Image (tube, rainbow, N blue to C red):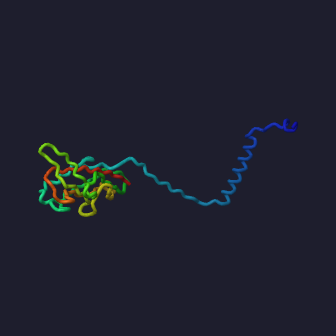
């Protein structure tokens, strides 16, 4: 017991410094023996910039006037109305844009969008009429959740999605009245 009392504890750094020096000299010699040339390539993108939607983010597309007689049978449709969703001023290095469409699906056929027109005095809503949206000039229906991808031109910094819409009667028996729909879209850039 008296021996333990006579021993003074040494400061911690007395043991720490020789230990650190031993580790550094050992690891340094290991690196020297097993050295090789290593190249590290670092890439990155600073996000936050996006393209500008030409004409603003909201567009109104006039589908025209169709006779109920034309929309009388199942899946009968009116003429297509073609329109672009154009992007400009895209940042340098942006390679592609993906657009995702969303809206309320039609109850009779979820591939189409619901007629969400609101009746007003003397202006009823057309029954059994929906809105169909597809890529132009052809392609599968762009139902809610569907996507399109386009390339961003590296020189002009522009991109364009060509789409078309029309009135369609999934079940036939369309009645006269207003047709309107609300289709949202989100554009993601890469």
- Residue 177 is situated, as x and y percent measured from the top left of the image, at 14, 50
Can residue 49 be seen? yes
* Image quarter of the C terminus: bottom left
Can residue 162 be seen? no
- Residue 34 is situated, as x and y percent measured from the top left of the image, at 65, 60
- Residue 96 is situated, as x and y percent measured from the top left of the image, at 35, 57
Q: Residue 147: name its quadrant.
A: bottom left
- Horizontal side of 86 relative to 122 (left or right) equals right
In the foreground, 1 or 149:
1
In the foreground, 79 or 32:
79
Q: Residue at x 17, y 45 (%)?
A: 119
* Image quarter of the N terminus: top right
In the foreground, 84 or 94:
84
Q: Residue at x 23, y 63 (%)?
A: 137
In the picture as drawn, the residue positioned furthest to the right comes out as 2
Marker count (numbered): 0
- Horizontal side of 29 relative to 110 (left or right) equals right
In the picture as drawn, the residue positioned furthest to the bottom comes out as 138
Q: Residue at x 71, y 47 (%)?
A: 20
In the foreground, 11 or 114:
114
- Residue 98 is situated, as x and y percent measured from the top left of the image, at 34, 55
Q: Residue at x 36, y 57 (%)?
A: 95
- Horizontal side of 41 relative to 69 (left or right) equals right
């Amino acid at each position: 017991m008296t021996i333990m009392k006579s021993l003074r504890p040494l400061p911690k750094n007395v043991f720490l410094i020789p230990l650190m020096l031993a580790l550094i000299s050992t690891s340094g010699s290991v690196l020297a023996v097993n050295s090789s040339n290593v190249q590290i390539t670092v890439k990155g993108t600073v996000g936050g910039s996006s393209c500008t939607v030409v004409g603003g983010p909201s567009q109104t597309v006039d589908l025209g006037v169709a006779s109920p007689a034309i929309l009388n049978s199942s899946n009968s449709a009116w003429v297509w109305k073609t329109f672009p969703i154009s992007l400009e001023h895209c940042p340098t290095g942006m390679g592609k844009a993906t657009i995702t469409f969303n809206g309320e699906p039609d109850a009779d056929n979820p591939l189409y969008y619901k007629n969400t027109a609101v009746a007003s005095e003397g202006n009823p809503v057309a029954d059994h009429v929906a809105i169909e949206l597809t890529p132009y000039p052809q392609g599968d229906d762009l139902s809610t959740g569907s996507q399109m991808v386009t390339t961003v031109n590296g020189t002009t910094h522009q991109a364009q999605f060509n789409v078309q819409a029309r009135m369609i009667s999934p079940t036939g028996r369309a009645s006269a009245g207003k047709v309107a729909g609300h289709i949202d879209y989100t554009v993601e850039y890469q």
